[in-house]
Image (cartoon, helix red, strand yellow):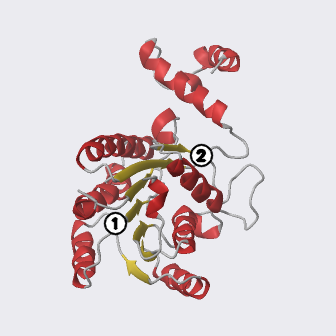
C-alpha cells in the first residue's frame, strides 16, 4: 500500500498546531479527502475559526481541543475522550512547536523549548502509538522537524537541539515500526522558508517571493509520502534542493574532516565552504 492511501474518507487524523500554518494546511489536505479531523492547538479562538471554516467547505467531522502539548496529563485526557467514542487514529501529525530565543544562562528558555518541541512530540507518540501498532490498513505518523535541526546554524541552540532530537526519534520510530507494523509509515516533514501570516508570527499579510505558502508544504508532504520517502525536506523559492543537499553535506563534513563545529559560519572556513559547495557535484 502507498502511504498516501491513509488519506481516505472516514479515516481519523489528529494534527497538533492545527489551527494555523503548516498544521492547518495539512488539515485542509486531510479534509479534501473527507477524513475526520481532531485538531489540537493552544489558540482557542483560531481553533473555533478553523472548525467553522472547514465545516463549511468539507464533509469532515471535526473536533477541536485546546491543549498544551507539553502536558502529559492533557494528552491522557485527550486519549480518554477519544476512547469514549471508540475513536482510533489513522493519521497523526505532531506539528506543534515554538521558536523562542534566549541566552545560555536562561535555563527556562531551554526547558520551555524542549517541553513543547521535543516532549510535545514524545507525549503524542507515547499516547497514541498503540493505535498504529499492528495496523491492518495503511496508517501514518508525520513529525515536523526543521532544517536547523540538521545544519545547526548559530543563534538558537535550544531550538536547534530540540529539532535535532526530533529528527533522531523520528528515525528510530520509523525503523522500529517498519519491523513491527509495516502498514504504518513514518515521515519527517522539514519545511523550508514558509509564510504563515500573522497567525504564524509573520509581520505582514503579503507573502515574500522567496517563501512557500503552507499549502505548498502540505502538497510536498503528500508527494513525498506517495514516493514512499521518510524525509520530506522542502525547498522554497530561494533555496532549492541542490543547495539544501550541499549545506547538509558540508555540515556532516565537520565531523568527517574534523573541522571546528558550525564551520560554515566561521571566518576561517567561509571561503573554503563557498568554494567547495559551489563546485560540489551531486
Residue assigned mark 1: 69
The correct choice, above or below, for 243 with respect to 39 in the image is above
Give the class, few, some or many, for how many residues have Cα within 10 Å of label 1's Cα (few <14, many ≥20).
Answer: many
Q: Is residue 152 visible?
A: no
Question: How many dots with numbers?
Answer: 2
Foreground residue among 179 and 47:
179
The correct choice, above or below, for 218 with respect to 74 in the image is above
User: Is label 2 in a helix, a strand or a loop?
Assistant: loop
Foreground residue among 131 and 273:
131
Residue beneath the point at 35% across and 45% down: 170
Task: Mark 2 vs mark 1: give the one in front.
Answer: 2
Q: x, y (%) of residue 32?
A: 57, 73
Q: Is residue 67 visible?
A: yes
Residue assigned mark 2: 234
Q: x, y (%) of residue 160?
A: 44, 42
Q: x, y (%) of residue 155?
A: 52, 40
* Label 2 or label 1, whichever comes before in sequence order: 1
Residue beneath the point at 61% across and 34% down: 244
Q: x, y (%) of residue 149?
A: 45, 40
Amino acid at each position: 500500500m502507498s502511504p498516501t492511501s491513509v488519506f481516505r474518507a472516514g479515516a481519523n487524523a489528529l494534527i497538533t498546531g492545527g489551527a494555523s500554518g503548516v498544521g492547518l494546511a495539512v488539515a485542509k489536505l486531510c479534509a479534501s479527502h473527507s477524513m475526520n479531523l481532531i485538531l489540537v492547538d493552544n489558540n482557542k479562538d483560531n481553533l473555533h475559526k478553523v472548525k467553522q471554516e472547514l465545516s463549511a467547505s468539507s464533509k469532515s467531522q471535526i473536533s477541536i481541543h485546546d491543549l498544551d502539548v507539553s502536558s502529559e496529563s492533557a494528552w491522557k485526557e485527550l486519549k480518554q475522550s477519544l476512547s469514549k467514542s471508540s475513536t482510533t487514529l489513522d493519521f497523526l501529525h505532531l506539528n506543534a512547536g515554538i521558536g523562542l530565543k534566549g541566552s545560555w544562562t536562561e535555563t527556562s528558555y531551554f526547558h520551555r523549548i524542549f517541553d513543547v518541541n521535543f516532549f510535545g512530540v514524545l507525549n503524542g507518540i507515547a499516547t497514541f502509538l498503540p493505535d498504529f501498532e499492528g495496523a491492518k490498513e495503511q496508517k501514518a505518523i508525520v513529525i515536523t522537524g526543521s532544517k536547523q535541526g540538521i545544519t545547526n546554524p548559530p543563534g538558537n541552540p535550544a531550538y536547534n537541539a530540540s529539532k535535532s532530537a526530533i529528527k533522531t526519534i523520528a528515525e528510530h520510530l520509523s525503523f522500529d515500526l517498519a519491523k513491527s507494523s509495516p502498514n504504518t509509515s513514518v515521515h519527517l516533514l522539514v519545511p523550508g522558508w514558509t509564510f504563515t501570516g500573522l497567525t504564524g508570527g509573520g509581520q505582514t499579510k503579503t507573502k515574500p517571493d522567496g517563501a512557500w505558502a503552507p499549502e505548498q508544504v502540505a502538497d510536498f508532504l503528500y508527494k513525498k509520502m506517495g514516493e514512499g520517502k521518510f524525509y520530506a525536506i522542502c525547498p522554497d523559492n530561494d533555496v532549492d534542493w541542490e543547495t539544501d543537499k550541499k549545506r547538509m553535506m558540508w555540515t556532516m563534513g565537520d565531523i568527517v574532516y574534523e573541522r571546528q563545529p558550525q564551520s560554515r559560519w566561521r571566518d576561517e572556513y567561509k571561503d573554503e565552504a563557498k568554494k567547495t559547495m559551489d563546485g560540489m557535484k551531486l
